Image (cartoon, helix red, strand yellow):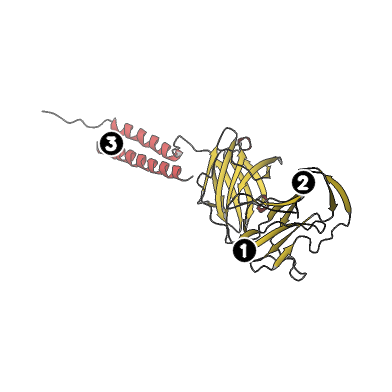
Amino acid sequence: MKKTALALTLILALSASAVIRVAIVNLGRAQSGTATATSNPAATVASGGNGNLELTMSLDRTTYVLGEPVNLTLMITNISNQTINFTHTGLDFDFQIYNDTNNIVYQWSNFKAIPQFITIVPLQVGQSRSANFTWSQTCNFNAQVEGDTVSPGIYNIIGETGPTYRIQTTPTQLTIVKTTPTPTPTTPATTTPTPTATVLATTSNNETVDLKISGNITSSQMSSLTIATNQSAAKTTVSFTVTGEGGTTGYGNITIPISSVLYGTNPVIYIDGSQASNQGYARDSNNYYVWYTTSFSTHKVSIVFTARSSVPEFPSPVILSLVIILAVSVSVAFMPGKRMETN
């Protein structure tokens, strides 16, 4: 009986050890470009005219992060009641940037080789001509500072036509800030988010996959995008390098087609090998929508898709030990011994 009790004690101890080990296992798991906003006020339009022609300047917003391109559109429209013979030259449009002390810091046409021609183009009633421009937040008011980056602060931008008409818009105030405000996503991982760009990722078979992105991390800040699969580990990993100005914060939302994730169903984001503290995802029948935030510099980002096991996996050595102990205990329990004599 003592041997049987000892065997049963060993079984209970090993069973408890197995449960603890299972719990540990389960716990172990320069005239084009797109500006990206961190704050997104409504588009701003300024205008000016001479009675027959109206010049309008459109900007997508008025607050930018230092170094972020400022995109604008200038458009001239015939607002008269008759056709105008518009004088088209190599400089139909121009724009100027002034600082908060009203000193010019940039003019688009400065130090440019302007084509020299004149063409008469009929402009019907209500018809327009337009052009897109980008200011890279640099100076060019003289040759010594050409290409130097401006400082954070308040600036005014004025659109104008060339010297033929000399029409100017009213000034529009721009605010340039040093850092990106820390994003506070309320529903960051939404199905079918509005993408702002597309990046290409290369698979293990050297095929390319379009990944749509949104947020303030632009396609130019992402490089070396790959999608790697590991059949034996039942894992798919989307990897890339992201780069940004130190001291700022980036927020990205990536749309990943389910058809590109051959193994795994639950994405977890790692930044430089450590699990990202602010991340999440959603999915529909076609895509995963994965979001994350990161403090900028240069980082390696990995989105790892793995499968969660719904059945606890007991370590095989424990099972073997249980079987051996159970067999021994049963054998001991039925071992012949001395019977107690009764009177």
Q: Dot 3: few (<14), some (14–19), or many (≥20) neighbours within 10 Å?
A: some
Q: Which residue is mark 1?
A: 154
In this view of the protein, can residue 131 be seen by the observer? Answer: no
User: What is the quadrant of the N terminus in the image?
Assistant: top left
x%, y% of residue 300?
Answer: 61, 53
CA–CA distance between discs 2 and 1?
36 Å
Quick one: 192 or 89, which is closer to the camera?
Answer: 89
User: Could you tell me how many numbered marks the image carries?
Assistant: 3
Pick whichever of labels 2 and 1 is earlier in the sequence: 2
Q: Secondary structure at mark 2?
A: loop
Quick one: 210 or 153, which is closer to the camera?
Answer: 153
* Disc number placed over residue 80 in the picture, else none: 2
* Disc number placed over residue 238 in the picture, else none: none
Q: Which residue is mark 3?
A: 4
Q: Dot 2: few (<14), some (14–19), or many (≥20) neighbours within 10 Å?
A: some
- The answer to whether mark 3 and mark 1 are in CB contact below 8 A is no
CA–CA distance between discs 3 and 2?
108 Å
Q: Nearer the viewer, mark 3 or mark 1?
A: 1
x%, y% of residue 339?
Answer: 20, 30
Q: Nearer the viewer, mark 3 or mark 2?
A: 2
x%, y% of residue 335?
Answer: 29, 31
Pick whichever of labels 3 and 2 is earlier in the sequence: 3
Identity, as a three-letter code, of the amino acid under mark 3 = Thr
Left or right: 293 with respect to 223?
Answer: left
